[in-house]
Amino acid sequence: MSGNGSVWVRCTGCGHLIYSNRFARDLRVCHECGVHAPLSAIQRVEQLLDPGWGDIDHAQPAGDPLGFADRMPYPQRLAEAREATGLNDAAIQVRGRIGGHPVVVVVMDFRFLGGSLGTSVGDLVVRAAETALAERTPLLMVTASGGARMQEGALALMQMARTSQALVALDEAGVLTVSLITDPTFGGVAASFATQADVILAEPGARMGFAGPRVIEQTLGTGLPEGFQRAPYLLEHGLIDDVVPRRRLRAVLSRLLTLGRPGTVVAMDPTPVITDPAALAEADPMRPVRAARDPGRPTTLDYAYQLCDSFKELHGDRMSADCPAVVAGIGRLAGGAVVLIGHQKGHDASELTSRNFGMATPAGYRKAARLMLLAQKLGLPVVTLIDTPGAYPGVEAEAQGQMLAIAANLRLMCSLRVPIVAVVTGEGGSGGALALGVADRVFILEHGVYSVISPEGCASILWRTPSATGQAAAALRLVPADLLRFGVVDGVIPEPPGGAHVNHPDVADAVRAAVTTCLAELATVPPDDLVRTRRRRFAGFGSQAYVEGARS
């Protein structure tokens, strides 16, 4: 943004003249085009933290370890930067609160030598991490950097490893870390602490990458795609969790910081869960298949916002993509923080198509695994909602390792040291469903189904005719009564009259009651016992008792 005296400011994005008082009220965001103007480190602290934040810890003044000089000696560059910014170096640390939740904050300032990462900035990041570790307080890192500081040579390079090591200690201690990416964040900062946080948010328009666009263009001798390395591109490619406008940052950060105080899930008034197969009326097996596929049934997002007091969806596998067929995030359920993960279908043709009909790609299962590991780090229970015809059977999915992603989730869930409760809310199709289903307790809704293959697929392969779909459904024994008899599920959650698709609130209440009752029970079980019992459960499915049960 460019100033015009003290009254008007000209937007560098659209050129619009903005009254300076309004510009300040809008947090230095253009109300015409939405461009987020740069903030100094102090301005950032004032915007993010509750009033009454603590003293600012400035980075220690940098020395000149190499005796470096280009067009001017390095000490002269430092002196000019200090005079221009009022800072010792390119970052500050402060302790405060956001929405009442304590947090340790590191804020970088691009005005100081391009926010470059040198020894003093690295030292400040490490000190902030040590403070967060000692106080068991979440760490927020606000980044703005062109990369490692050239004037400090290999010593600057080593700060990437040094700061990474400091964050490892927070991982081991179960302390939440959050990054806020501002424009620009490149090089050594992007390839170290900025992207090692548990949750990565970005402001609209922020750019992030290892190599800068000019370097890439010069190396490749070609232009770059529109929006390359900007926040929406990063979100689409699964590299960040969300893009958050400045006006919403405090609210989003406050919600995330509740993870710093997980709490305990309190059991709700129990809804009767059916555990006797004889209590379930025998029916045409295709009837629950059709009911499970009804587009009016609640989706994972429907459940998320009805089960949780607050829910924040997180995105991306941190590798290549954000699969829309899997929703994952954090929320507060009956007083305790939980990680909620589930397949996402939709209520109409457009949404079903955009969500890939709930068929996850490898990125979806990797996103789920990432959130499960976050749950384990923070000691949060995991709730999974299963509703998929199966994993996506496409060429790209196979090339990206669909079988590896599913196998990795099965392995992870066998050893996850926090409680896991799974609910089949609609279709439980094959390995694509089981990849979210290795749990301590498994429930199914009254009109849900769970099977190794769809009836249509089974009829096509074994009967070699689609007319045998009904026969296949009966033979597969995929309805809740049979699943309960085999021990595949622990209980059947009743649906309201007419089915879940006609009464979302009541079925959400029933799911909440079943899940919270289980989580309250499992909260008292030591982690080693959780894992041991879960493994014993799934080891039993090949036993003679189960074979005899299947034949009866």
Image (cartoon, rainbow, N blue to C red):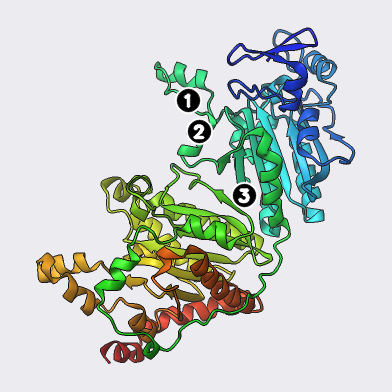
Answer yes or no: is residue 165 visible: no
Residue at position x 39%, y 83% from top?
484
Name which of mark 1 and mark 2 comes first in the sequence. Answer: 1
Image quadrant for the C terminus? Answer: bottom left
Q: Earlier in the sequence, mark 1 or mark 3?
A: 3
Residue 335, quarter of picture? bottom right
Where residue 524 appears, as percent x and y from the top left, is 66, 78
Q: From mark 3 to mark 2, how far is it between C-alphas?
A: 19 Å
- Residue at 64% in and 75% down: 267
Query: Which label number is shown at residue 472?
Result: none
Residue 127, given in percent of the width and then of the height, sits at 80, 43
> Tag 2: residue type?
Pro
Residue 232: mark: 2
Q: Which residue is mark 1?
A: 227
- Hey, what amino acid is under mark 1? Gly
Which residue sits at x=58%, y=36%?
Answer: 191
Quote the CA–CA distance across marks 1 and 2. Answer: 8 Å
Left or right of 9? Residue 308 is: left
Foreground of the two, 201 or 186: 201
Name the residue tied to disc 3.
Answer: 198
In contact (CB < 8 Å): disc 1 and disc 2: yes
Image quadrant in which you'd find residue 409: bottom left
Task: Give the class, few, some or many, for how many residues have Cα within 10 Å of label 3's Cα (few <14, many ≥20).
Answer: some
Asked whether residue 456 appears in the rendered view, the answer is yes
Residue at 54%, 32% (x, y): give it: 231
Relative side of 431 to 461, left or right: right
Secondary element under disc 3, as helix, strand or loop, is loop
